[in-house]
Image (spheres, rainbow, N blue to C red):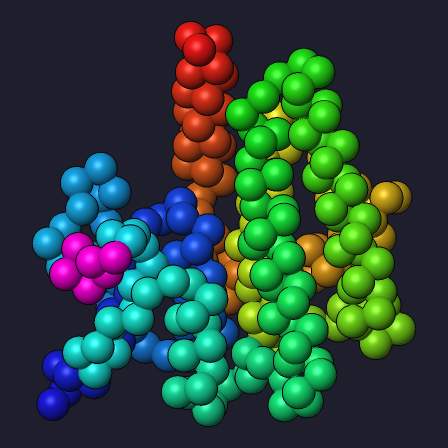
């Protein structure tokens, strides 16, 4: 039975989606075993647990596998009552968390990574598109946060904080690779304050990948993307 009650996370150190789950487990204080997956040579267990997408993250609890990061975050919220609530009790507030979490995932993730995959005029267009999306998020967070103040700490961080942090938590590595800032304090004061507060949380620091390793991965990602576009 002890084996069955184990919590196991199958992830990959650089995956922002796996980092979401890792961060949620750390914030909730849930003991877990971590299994690092090689996505170029996926383990039989990963394929068994996630036969549809064959991707990380996968959380295994009581011998049952849960896939897809946002689904896993809600599962963690509903299963473990101790620690910070990952979703608010108020139905309207909860709907706003889901709305903005989906906005970040659907509107900002691919747009942001397009900045890494382009250069010159194409990159500037991508940056402008990111700023457009960030403006919408900035305005939304001014309303979402009381008095526009994120006020996030280890005891109240939730799903929306986790999703935002999974994209921009490694902002220093991102800035080093592309040579520009995305979350600019003058343009996005609420988002900047939110990010600076999040990266100082102990759970975030513990889950964060090493800076040099993150820089190396992003540089390779950018180089490969630029070479592919040139070849095409």
Query: In the rendered image, is residue 168 in sight?
Result: no
Query: In the rendered image, is residue 218 in sight?
Result: yes
Q: Which residue is found at the position 55% from the left and 78% from the top? A: 86
Could you tell whether 153 is left or right of 9 in the image?
A: right
| Residue in the foreground of this view, choosing between 9 and 202 | 9
The outermost residue toward the top is: 231
Q: Quadrant of the C terminus?
A: top left
Residue 12 belongs to the span the image colors magenta: no
The location of residue 125, given as percent across then percent down, is: 72, 26
The location of residue 108, given as percent across then percent down, is: 63, 47
| Residue in the foreground of this view, choosing between 33 and 222 | 222
Residue 49 belongs to the span the image colors magenta: yes
| Residue in the foreground of this view, choosing between 168 and 74 | 74
Q: Which residue is found at the position 63% from the left and 90% from the top? A: 89
The location of residue 213, given as percent across then percent down, is: 41, 36
Count the labels in the image: 0
The location of residue 208, given as percent across then percent down, is: 47, 53
Q: Which residue is found at the position 18% from the left and 46% from the top? A: 42
- Using the rendered view, name the quadrant where residue 184 is placed: top right
**206 shown above or below 39:** below
Could you tell whether 206 is left or right of 105 in the image?
A: left
- Using the rendered view, name the quadrant where residue 171 is placed: top right
Q: Which residue is found at the position 14% from the left and 51% from the top? A: 43
**92 shown above or below 211:** below
| Magenta part of the chain | 47-52
- Using the rendered view, name the quadrant where residue 183 is placed: top right
């Amino acid at each position: 039975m002890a084996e069955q009650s184990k919590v196991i996370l199958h992830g990959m150190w650089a995956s922002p989606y796996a980092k979401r789950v890792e961060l949620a487990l750390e914030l909730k204080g849930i003991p877990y075993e971590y299994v690092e997956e090689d996505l170029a040579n996926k383990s039989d267990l990963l394929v068994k647990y996630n036969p549809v997408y064959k991707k990380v993250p996968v959380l295994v609890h009581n011998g049952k596998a849960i896939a897809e990061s946002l689904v896993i975050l809600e599962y963690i919220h509903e299963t473990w009552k101790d620690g910070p609530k990952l979703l608010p009790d108020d139905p309207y507030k909860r709907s706003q968390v889901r709305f903005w979490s989906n906005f970040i995932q659907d509107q900002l993730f691919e747009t942001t990574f397009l900045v890494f995959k382009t250069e010159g005029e194409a990159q500037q267009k991508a940056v402008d598109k990111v700023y457009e999306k960030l403006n919408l998020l900035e305005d939304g967070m001014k309303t979402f946060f009381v008095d526009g103040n994120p006020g996030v700490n280890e005891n109240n961080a939730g799903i929306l904080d986790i999703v935002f942090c999974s994209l921009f938590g490694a902002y220093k590595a991102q800035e080093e690779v592309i040579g520009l800032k995305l979350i600019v304090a003058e343009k996005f004061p609420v988002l900047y304050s939110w990010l600076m507060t999040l990266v100082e949380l102990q759970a975030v620091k513990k889950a964060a990948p090493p800076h040099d390793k993150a820089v190396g991965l992003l540089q390779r990602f950018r180089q490969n993307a630029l070479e592919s576009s040139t070849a095409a």
